[in-house]
Image (spheres, rainbow, N blue to C red):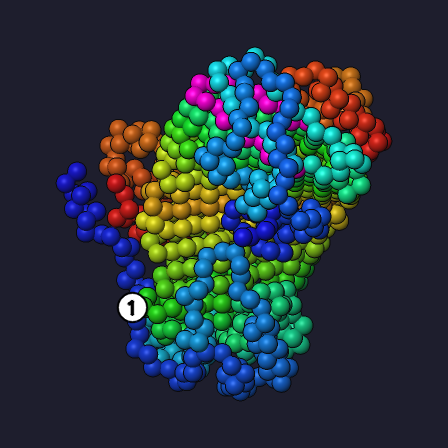
Amino acid sequence: MKDFKEEKTRVDQADRTIYDVKDRLDPAYLMDSGITPEIVNQISKEKNEPEWMRLFRLKSLKLYNEIPLPTWGPSLDELNMDQIVTYVRPKSTMKAKWSDVPDDIKETFERLGIPKAERKSLAGVGAQYDSEVVYHNVRAEVASQGVVYTDIESALTGPYSDMIRKHFMKLVPPSDHKFAALHGAVWSGGSFVYVPAGVSVEIPLQSYFRLNAPGAGQFEHTLIIVEEGAYLHFIEGCSAPRYYVANLHAGCVELYVGKNARLRYSTIENWSKNMYNLNTKRASVEEGGTVEWISGSFGSHISYLYPMSILKGKKARMEFTGITFAGEGQNLDTGAKVLHAAPDTTSHISTKSISRDGGNSTFRSVVTVTEKAEGSKSAVSCESLMLDSISRSDTIPVMDISCNQADIGHEAKIGRISESAIFYLMSRGLSEDDARALIVGGFAEPIAKELPLEYAVEMNNLIHLEMKGSIG
Amino acid sequence: MNTQINRLPVPTWNRTGVNWLDQKALPPDREYLQGRHLPYDGILPHGITLMDHLPAEVADIKSGMGEWLDESIRNGADKTCYLLGNGIASEPVIITQNLDLTQPVIRTHFAIKANPGSNLTVVQINRGDAKDGVIENLTQIDAQTDSFVRLISIQLLGKNSQSFDAVGARIGKGAKIELIRAVFGGKTAACGSMAHLEGQGGGYQQDTAYFTDEDQIFDFNDIASHIGRETVSEMHTAGVLSGHSSKILRGTIDFKAGSAHSIGHENETVLLLSPSARNRTVPLILCGEEAVEGQHAATLGRFDEKQLYYLCSRGLSLMEAKRLLVEARFMPVLNKITQDDLRQEILTIIERRLDEHEISS
């Protein structure tokens, strides 16, 4: 009992050492803060983009200025866009070997375990540092199958430029919402993946996004096209050191899943707790195709994150498995959206959330079934765990059904850790905090088992770190 | 003052159209003049008396429809009915309101104060029809310690009229309130209830049944606000949608800080009979307290094939099986209507609608 008390008083914040190491700010180019047509033109010029993209950016900026802030969700009043630096170019161009990446940047990614993961369990890695990709590589045997995995800027001016122009911000148009418009205006970095028909990429690809500069924004764009009958598992990771000024992440992910193709998109989000994470993710799924979202949200001060799936082909399928862990100073508004727009489509949303130490976790969803979606099925399940009474946990689902030949189910539960379960585990010799940690770990287990082993271990470590100091 | 009706307690995406009652379903733009405030003049059973004024502690009980409508009806009612429960009422108070050409607008303010330990049932029946007719009711209930109030609200208007039914209930220590609602009529029917579970051990039970038809628009906003410890809410809604109708149900269980050891359950089952009907369900759980248990569930869509198969295997035709399943949805509400003739009247409406729609094909 004594040991338990000592640990409680000693550990009051999760240990984020590896994520919180700050590199000296030493960019090759630092844009003025704020967002103006001059800044947007300058970003386009720095990136040597085609003219259509410059015009696209300016059109998006106009929309950004016209669209109001959301009137729902966590307050964004403290986010001052005039103080956000939208473009920070690191002192390195993109490399294909880690040995060519500058030492300080390389060490950051080494600490985060990215090169090691690449060697052990990935088919390719992209690493972005502030606004630009500094490393991109894909295994030769994967590339030889015709798989393209590159930074999106290279794709924009290379042999895939027509493909980029055809798909870029078509699923998430800049008119979608204010931060989609912002993304359209100042996007930078990100990855492009193309998996040809019938190709199965057996080992995952991963892109890792690191934001180092204080007061900066990161606006990477991820575009993935998985052609008919192909398979890909893509992993997205992100982190940043904590600063006392707001950082902003307004990325955009567009996924095109072809006929009978399957794409699994996994995210472990561990931004620092000064981050506004206003990310938009959307997938279009053709006949017989499947998109699977695995999402772990641990970081950020404020999050708006609702991956959307458009099931446009017959028998298209979507699965969303997510966990959100909101602690002190965090207001994480997460969930999923699905549009059933074709017959016999299916969706399954399963989420867990944990709130503690004054954290605020909100599950928000919308399931839309159009009149065309005869024979479709959807099941939504969300469970929330409250670890104290100074936290909040809200559940805000919407089901919009315009089809009389569909089966839609929804269930949600909220509660606390069962005292009888703690009592039982303590009677078997566990301390109270170990018993609670075990129960929370079990609560998150359905998510962990969907991740590759290394990432499940990372997620379990994050849960363990977050749980320390919150118990008792 | 915000004039939106049936506002979702916490807003969500505006494009879902569920944050409040659609503007096109609003009551016609009339001035809310100071009403005549004619008191109820019916006969009251033993155990219930009329109050000659509205107690201040009842006047401030908010309904689920929003302060603007509450205030409009409170200040602009044509008729008032302020009931006081003392002891056990010998029989229900039955209040019927009829819309017709001579009285196309009815605006009534009901208040029910149940003294400690009292027990009473009030039945409100709204029927009739008139071009651009409107019935607006506000019912404020103050259930004091260990009292029991059952409010049965039956809406059988014609399809030229609109109905706005606001209920606000404060539930004291050990008190219980039951709201039984059957909504069938009106081109627009908007209902908004809010149960303020303030006293320890207070209970709230709500059962709603609805059946839409043609172009009807139904809009519900039901909130169980758990404030006191060990409070319990149960909200159950069952409905059938047909024609080109649409319906929104916002159902919220709100656990306030301090409502420890409270339990809130909510569920909805919806059957869509028509490919042109639209259902929107928004079941919220808001939680600022650790030691609570909240659950909601919704089942939406078509007939359950396993149930149909079972019933057909017992000798029913497919049509008979479907009718049985539809009628079964309404039974939890119908069984709580103690007036046989009223229950039969509702069953007849259900039968007629089933005859008119795809269920017979």
> Does the segment drawn in magenta span residue B111?
yes
**In the image: residue B269, left or right of residue A133:** right
Residue B109 visible somewhere in the drawing: yes
Q: Tell me which segment is drawn in magenta.
A: B107-125
- Image position, residue B1 (x, y; %): 54, 52
Residue A127 visible somewhere in the drawing: no
Residue at (32% x, 66% y) in the render:
A242
Residue positioned most to the left: A2
Disc 1 marks which amino acid? Val
Quarter occupied by residue B155: top right
Badge 1, how many Cα within 10 Å: few under 14, some, many 20+? Answer: some
The image quadrant where one finds the C terminus of chain A is top left
Q: Main secondary structure of the magenta part?
A: strand
Q: Is residue B316 above or below residue A314?
A: above
**In the image: residue B109, left or right of residue B28:** left
Residue at (70% x, 50% y) in the render:
B29
Q: Is residue B96 above or below residue A329?
A: above
**In the image: residue A257, left or right of residue A419:** right
Q: Nearer the viewer, residue A268 or A324?
A: A324
Residue at (70% x, 29% y) in the render:
B97
Q: Nearer the viewer, residue A11 or A33?
A: A33
Quarter occupied by residue B323: top right
Q: Nearer the viewer, residue A5 or B278?
A: B278
Q: Nearer the viewer, residue A246 or A310?
A: A246
The image quadrant where one finds the N terminus of chain A is top left
Question: Mark 1: which secondary structure?
Answer: loop
- Image position, residue A7 (x, y; %): 19, 47
Residue at (53% x, 28% y) in the render:
B52
Q: Callout 1: residue from which chain?
A: A
Q: Which residue is mark 1?
A: A21
- Image position, residue A6 (x, y; %): 16, 46
Q: Is residue A97 above or below residue A354?
A: below
